[in-house]
Image (cartoon, rainbow, N blue to C red):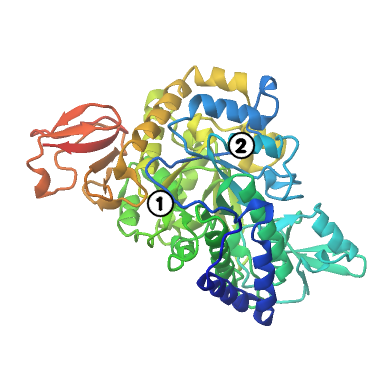
Amino acid sequence: MIKTVSREQLNLVRKRFERLYGTQAGKLLERFVMMIGRYGVGVDVVPFESHWDEKDSVLITYADTLRDSANGTPLNALKAFADQHFKGAIRSIHLLPFYPWSSDDGFSVIDYRKVDPACGTWCDVQKLGEGFDLMFDVVLNHCSAHSSWFKDYVAGIEPARHYFLPMDPAGDFSQVVRPRTSPLLTRTRTRDVEAYIWTTFSADQVDLNWQNPEVLFEFLDILFLYLSKGMRIARLDAVAFLWKTLGTNCLHLPETHEVVKLLRDVLEIVAPRTVLLTETNVPHAENVSYFGQGDEAHMVYQFSLPPLCLHALATGNAVYLTKWAMNLAPPPPGCTFFNFTASHDGIGMRPIEGILPEDEKAKLVQHVEAAGGKINWRQMPDGSQQPYELNITYYSALADDGQPELGAARFLCSQALALSLRGVPGIYFQSLMATENDQAGVQASGENRSINRRKWQLDQLQQHLGQGVAATVFPAYLKMLRRRASHPAFHPDAAQIVYDVDPELFIHSRTDINRDELVFCIYNFTAKTKSIRNPANSPLLQKTKKFYDILSGRTYGSGRRGIKLAPYQALWLVPRS
């Protein structure tokens, strides 16, 4: 039976339609109501208590990262590997775009409703979803120039002939903010005229016209399809660029926020357990604007964390990371952060604008280049170029070839930090495997981002995990994840306090929702032994005689000399009376 929709919910959706499409709102609302139940979505909506808890973590991976002839498709190989290793450690798997594509490793989608045969089938996706919650990408800013939509546009066929954005090249685009140095407009010969089409990211990634409600309803149908296939988290890719209005920067426009709010309202009606995650790789204040008033995204990426954490561990200076974390406002009720250090993209530099001084940014760029990384640049309105993205595996960025054990400790310190902060942790596949820079991949593709997108044969991966640093990192990482999952102080809604105690240490505490468990998380960001007597400089802890470390299982006394931390050691301490 199709769920009954309340009058309040319908009125809210109508208001969203009015703000976006004016007088068409009434007909659009009727059309939306008729959609409920499509693909079985909106039928028998199951009640739930919370969107997340301390057991939540997300593995980020391409659907074809693993290949194994014995398991058939890459998706089946991933399922077999995940079933063997990730139970109790990972709850959700983010499958990066697994649809037919033409460029950008999946983010130039040819057909949103199909699975790339090179990855597997919808059946394979659903089988993976039997053991793990799934995150799908909704790539809604642009599609492939090889898609049927764009081919129909070129041929003048309805409705796609109005799906894109032909522009006058003589127009003023000077305020437009974009992350690429390629031309904004791409010349295209259509059936009738020569057109200049808006292409924010590349000539093959053609921006969609969201001022046309037909585009919205295409994506509502796609959203319903994904929900029917097991999607639990919907990642809105590059959503900040969605709505275009000349004379503005075409970034974070009010209409863009309204679209996100509309999608949230739709999910509240048809699949309320679904989490909406926005991907907006921009300065922090702009990024968190997608929480709205608690009525927009459920989660936003903590984009400032990867560069700040890397800078702190590369320089042995936690001052900037600590200051940022201390000033981090808690998210609205029902919202949280998606904490990560690495993903399929590089480490963004825009999110640390106004946080890290220019000379410290230069140190970070130099460190990455010295570690074998690559830099992607963006073009500024004045024609100059600024570093936009650091391309490197997070392991290689923190490794130490001369002292591999020390490098492993430094890397694991970074990952423990991301796991302990308030929010839901995201773990990139290559980080979990302690993958080194894939220079051969960069040479083969000509793309800097390929440095962190290695494809593995299963037997090669198993050999890799059985030797060297990976043999230390992989089990240690999974152990951290499992231990985190058993402590309610790491619930995404649990309170967090950051302490400024020592410029070479990062310290914060987490207190569970019921105030039954307190954990102090302490990180040594240097290659020397450090000691600390009172993690929070708190009178309440002066009588604490012992601390239990969740990570190692050891008990530490708080004597005169305090607690000693080995180089790059991480501690998750629970006070014991």
Badge 2 density bin: few <14, some 14–19, many ≥20, Cα 10 Å = many
Residue 291 in view, yes or no = yes
Q: Which residue is mark 1?
A: 49
Q: Which residue is mark 2?
A: 453
Which quarter of the figure has residue 516? Answer: top left
Horizontal side of residue 549 vs 278, given as left or right: left
Between 199 and 143, the one lying in front of the other is 143
Which quarter of the figure has residue 43? Answer: bottom right
Where, quadrant-wise, is the N terminus in this rendering? bottom right
Which residue is found at the position 74% from the left and 67% from the top? 214
Which residue is found at the position 41% from the left and 34% from the top? 411
Which residue is found at the position 27% from the left and 51% from the top? 498
Between 307 and 123, the one lying in front of the other is 123
Residue 410 in view, yes or no = no
Q: Horizontal and vertical percent for residue 172?
A: 69, 76
Q: Amino acid at mark 2?
A: Arg
Which residue is found at the position 39% from the left and 27% from the top? 476
Residue closest to the far right: 191
Mark 1 or mark 2: which comes first in sequence?
1
Where, quadrant-wise, is the C terminus in this rendering? top left
User: Is 458 situated above or below 131?
Assistant: above
User: Mark 1 or mark 2: which is in front?
Assistant: 1
Element carrying mark 2: loop
Badge 1 density bin: few <14, some 14–19, many ≥20, Cα 10 Å = few
Q: CA distance from mark 1 to mark 2?
A: 36 Å
Horizontal side of residue 24 vs 334, given as left or right: right
Q: Horizontal and vertical percent for residue 215?
A: 72, 65
Q: Horizontal and vertical percent for residue 515?
A: 22, 49
Residue closest to the far front: 1
Q: Horizontal and vertical percent for residue 52?
A: 42, 48
